Image (cartoon, rainbow, N blue to C red):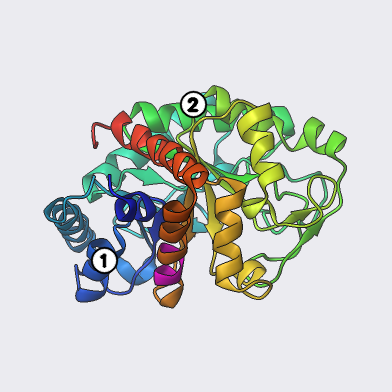
Amino acid sequence: MNIKDLAGQRLMIGFDGTTLNEQLKGYIRDFRVGGLIFFVRNLEEPRQIEQLCRDSQAYAREQGLPPLLIAVDQEGGKVARLQPPYTQFAGNPGIKTEEDAKEYARVMAKELLEAGFNMNMAPVMDVVPPDFDSIMTGRTFEGDTQTVATLGGHVIRYLQEYGILAVAKHFPGIGRTTLDSHLELPYCHTSRAQMEAEDLPPFVAAVKANVSGIMFSHIVYTDLDPDWPASISGTIISLLRDEMGYDGIIMTDDLDMGAIAKQYPINTVVEQFLKADADLALICHPGPNIATAFEIIKNGLEISPDMLERGKASVKRIMKAKDRLGLA
C-alpha cells in the first residue's frame, strides 16, 4: 500500500445519508478509509441497508482499496441500531448461559451478514459493581467478574464462529463510571490492583477468545495514566498489547465524543493516537475532523520511519481481521 492507503486504513468513519452519496464516495476515494460505522441516520429498512453496504464495498473495490470493515452497534437492549424487522434482543442482561450466548450470536450473525455488515461493536465486557449506579447499567452481563468473562467469551467465540468480527468494549473497563463520556471526560481513581482483580479479567477472556477488536474508553484512569484518556494513552495501550499479549485491532471510541472533543483539539488527539500506537481511530460524525485526521496520520507516516513501520504493523492487524472473513 502507498502512504495514503496506509493512513486511510486506520480510519473508521461515520457519514450522513442512506445511499452511496457524494459525501461517502469522497471519504472512500479521497481519504482511503478502512471502515464505516452505521448509525440510525443511515438505516431505513433491510433492502436499503443491503444496497448501501453492497454499493460501498463495490465503490471501495473501484478505488483499488481492500474491502471495508462495515460495523454497527448491535448489542441489543438499550443499544440496537437495527430495529424491527431485525430480531430484537434484551442484550447482555438477557444472556445467562452459554446456550443464550450461542443463540444470540447465531441469529445476530445471520442477520448482520445478510445486511452486509462484517463487524459488531459488541460485546460490552464492563463489570458493574453491586448496587452501583453505573452509566453502563442495563448494558452489561449480570453477575460478578468471572460471570462477565465467561459469558462475554462465549459471545465473542460464537459471533466469530458464525462469521462476524466481535469488538470487546470498553477497555480497561467503565463499569465504575457515572459520568457519560459522550458529554464529559470522566476520571476513574480505582487502583490498578483492584482493576486487575475486577475489571480486567473479562478482557483477559476476550484476548483468549481471539477477539478481533478491543475498543478503548475515553476515561482517565489516574492510577494507570494520569495524563491521557485510555483511548489515546500509550501506557494503557501497552498494558493490553505488551502485558496481556493482545495482537488484534486496538481502536478508540468515537473521537467526536465530548470527553475528547471538549478537552483537546483534533490535531492533538490524532498526534497522540499515533504516539500511543493505537490501530484504528473512530470518527463517527462527518465533518472536517475526518480530513484533519487523515492528513495528520499521512504526514506522520511520511516524516517518521519509525511511525511508518508501526503504521504498517497496525494495518497488518487490520488486514488480518479482514482476512479472517475472507475479505482481504
**Considering depth in this image, is 322 or 178 the residue closer to the camera?**
322
Up-down relation of residue 142 to residue 177 (above or below): above
Amino acid type at circle 2 is Asn
Which numbered disc, 2 or 1, marks the residue that appears first in the sequence?
A: 1
Label 2 packing within 10 angstroms: few (<14), some (14-19), many (20+): some
Determine if residue 192 is in view.
yes
Q: Residue at x 68, y 54 (%)?
A: 137
Number of numbered discs overlaid on the protein picture: 2
Any magenta on residue 37? no
Up-down relation of residue 168 to residue 56 (above or below): above
| Residue to which mark 2 is pinned | 210
| Residue to which mark 1 is pinned | 30
Any magenta on residue 291? yes
Query: In the picture, residue 119 is in which quadrant?
Result: top left
Label 1 packing within 10 angstroms: few (<14), some (14-19), many (20+): some
**Considering depth in this image, is 271 or 10 the residue closer to the camera?**
271
Q: Position of residue 228 (x, y in %)?
A: 72, 57
Separation of marks 2 and 1 at Cα, in angstroms: 33 Å
Up-down relation of residue 70 to residue 313 (above or below): below
Up-down relation of residue 213 to residue 23 (above or below): above
**Considering depth in this image, is 183 or 277 the residue closer to the camera?**
277
Q: Residue at x 32, y 29 (%)?
A: 324
Query: In the picture, residue 134 is in which quadrant?
Result: bottom right
Q: Main secondary structure of the magenta part?
A: helix
Residue 199 is marked as none
With 243 as the anchor, is 195 left or right in this view?
right
Q: Nearer the viewer, mark 2 or mark 1?
A: 1
